[in-house]
Amino acid sequence: MTAPAAIKKKAPGANDCGQEDQTAEHILQRCPLLDEERKEVWPSPTPLQTKLYGSRQELEKTTTFITSAGLIV
């Protein structure tokens, strides 16, 4: 099982930080445009593996992040 290659946002240009490719890792871990949403869901550092393949509770956090950020996967 692999992570999605790319994630898109609803808002035009909102996924365009220009720092690197918009991979699942970039969106979930580093994209500066999503820092606020990320910190609301994960106030402390959380490994990508946990966000993608963790417990049901962890996956619900990932879903919350995706929804609050307006992402389309």
Image (cartoon, rainbow, N blue to C red):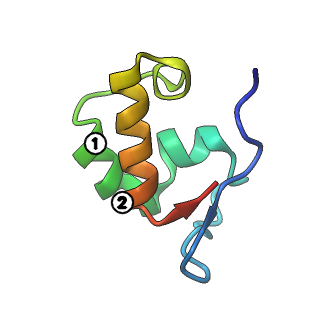
Decide: marks 2, 1 in contact (CB < 8 A)?
A: yes
Q: Which is nearer the eye, 63 or 46?
A: 63
Q: Quadrant of the C terminus?
A: bottom right
Q: Which is nearer the eye, 19 or 73?
A: 73
Classify mark 2: residues with Cα within 10 Å, few (<14), some (14-19) or many (20+).
some
Amino acid marked by disc 1: Val
Locate residue 11: give its quadrant: bottom right
Q: Label 2 belongs to which residue?
A: 68
Distance Cα–Cα, label 2 vs label 1 = 9 Å
Indicate which disc residue 41 carries.
1
Amino acid marked by disc 2: Ser
| Picture coordinates of residue 4, whole percent (x, y) | 72, 40
Residue positioned 70% across, 32% down in the render: 3
| Picture coordinates of residue 38, whole percent (x, y) | 35, 47
Q: Which is nearer the eye, 56 or 13?
A: 56
Q: Is residue 42 left or right of residue 20?
A: left
Q: Earlier in the sequence, mark 2 or mark 1?
A: 1
Q: Is residue 31 left or right of residue 58?
A: right
Classify mark 1: residues with Cα within 10 Å, few (<14), some (14-19) or many (20+).
some
